[in-house]
């Protein structure tokens, strides 16, 4: 089975050219340079990887993530972040996409449920519009309660936008949510451009009970055509070979064509820059 990893966070050992904005995020993580990631990909049997900007390490400077596909075009594509509340956010999005080859936008939020409604603040509308115009997917991380309840309005306003719910098990589903929130999460499945990302977080042993609660419903609601796997390395410490095996073991009940979608074909559809394989 061919495999694409749609979420690994590249972190450079070169602190001079790629200084971390927050050493607390960078310190102690396993090595995750481009070259190290390729070594780990080869060990795991992963053909391509989507490098996802480590916002907690580099903030909104996407330079290191952007450099990976330049150095290794047959192994990487990349996803970055911009400050969606900034006045020039849409212009920054266009720059990283058109000038630097960015394949998707990721909006990280805080995990606190009372601080995430800003993802749908009107000031962000130019970013959502520009992402739809550019044809790139937008992943929202830790959307929280307030943000989750705003996402349907965004999907209605920006019809055709491709949205990725970054982690099945993240706030609010990771926090014994109210039934209203569970229904809102799975209710988004009626929009055919919404996808759900399954990562090392979902398949970690400590989250097995929560995964048991929601996995079958995620498969039923979104179907295997809209579930996609990413290692989340090195935030999920890995190595990717073990993260991949954990996911394969948990999803082994799926027929082979469904596994091919989750681990390979869906990633190609979301990120055409990965190229032909």
Image (cartoon, rainbow, N blue to C red):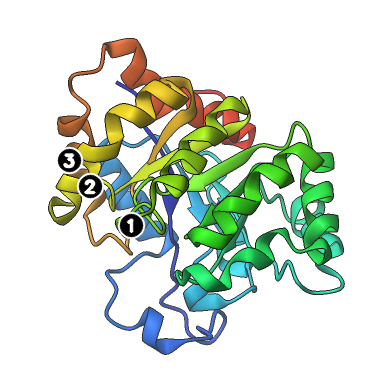
Tell me the distance, in whole angstroms, between the alpha carbons under discs 1 and 2. 21 Å
Q: Which mark is residue 246?
A: 3
Q: Quadrant of the N terminus?
A: top left
Tell me the CA gap for discs 3 and 1.
13 Å
Q: Is residue 254 above or below residue 241?
A: above
* Relative image position of residue 104 (x, y in whole percent): 64, 48
Task: Confirm whether residue 250 shows in the render.
Answer: yes
> Which residue sits at x=45%, y=63%?
10
| 1 vs 2, front mark | 2
Q: Residue at x 41, y 57 (%)?
A: 172
Quarter location, residue 111: bottom left
Asked if the residue under mark 3 is in contact with the one under mark 2, i.e. CB atoms within 8 Å, the reply is no
Tell me, for residue 233, which label it has, or none: 1
Badge 2 marks a residue whose secondary structure is helix
SS state under label 1: loop
The mark lying in front, picked from 3 and 1, is 3
Between 88 and 18, the one lying in front of the other is 88
**Residue position for label 2:** 210
Relative vertical location of residue 1 with respect to residue 24 in this rendering, above or below = above
The answer to which image quadrant residue 244 occupies is top left
| Residue sitting nearer the eye, 275 or 206 | 206
Residue 226 location, x and y as percent?
49, 27
Q: Earlier in the sequence, mark 1 or mark 2?
A: 2
The residue carrying pointer 1 sits among few (fewer than 14), some (14 to 19) or many (20 or more) residues within 10 Å by Cα, namely: many
User: Element under label 3?
Assistant: helix
């Amino acid at each position: 089975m061919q495999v694409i990893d749609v979420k690994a966070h590249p972190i450079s050992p070169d602190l001079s050219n790629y200084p971390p904005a927050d050493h607390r995020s960078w310190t102690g993580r396993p090595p995750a340079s481009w070259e190290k990631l390729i070594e780990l990909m080869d060990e795991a049997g992963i053909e391509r990887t989507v490098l996802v900007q480590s916002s907690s390490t580099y903030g909104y400077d996407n330079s290191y993530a952007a450099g990976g596909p330049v150095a290794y075009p047959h192994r990487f594509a990349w996803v970055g972040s911009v400050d969606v509340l900034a006045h020039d956010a849409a212009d920054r999005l266009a720059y990283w996409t058109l000038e630097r080859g960015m394949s998707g936008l990721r909006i990280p939020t805080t995990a606190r449920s009372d601080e995430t409604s800003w993802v749908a603040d009107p000031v962000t509308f130019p970013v959502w519009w520009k992402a739809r115009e550019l044809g790139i997917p937008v992943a929202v991380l830790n959307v929280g309660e307030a943000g989750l309840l705003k996402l349907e309005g965004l999907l209605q306003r920006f019809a055709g936008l491709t949205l990725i719910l970054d982690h099945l098990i993240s706030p609010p589903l990771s926090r014994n949510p109210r039934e209203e929130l569970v229904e809102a999460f799975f209710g988004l499945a009626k929009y055919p451009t919404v996808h759900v990302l399954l990562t090392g977080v979902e398949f970690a042993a400590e989250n097995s009970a929560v995964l048991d609660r929601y996995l079958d419903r995620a498969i039923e609601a979104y179907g295997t055509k809209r579930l996609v796997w990413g290692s989340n390395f090195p935030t999920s410490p890995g190595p990717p070979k073990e993260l991949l095996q954990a996911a394969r073991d948990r999803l082994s009940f799926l027929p082979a064509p469904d596994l091919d979608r989750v681990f390979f074909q869906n990633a190609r559809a979301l990120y055409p820059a990965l190229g032909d394989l």
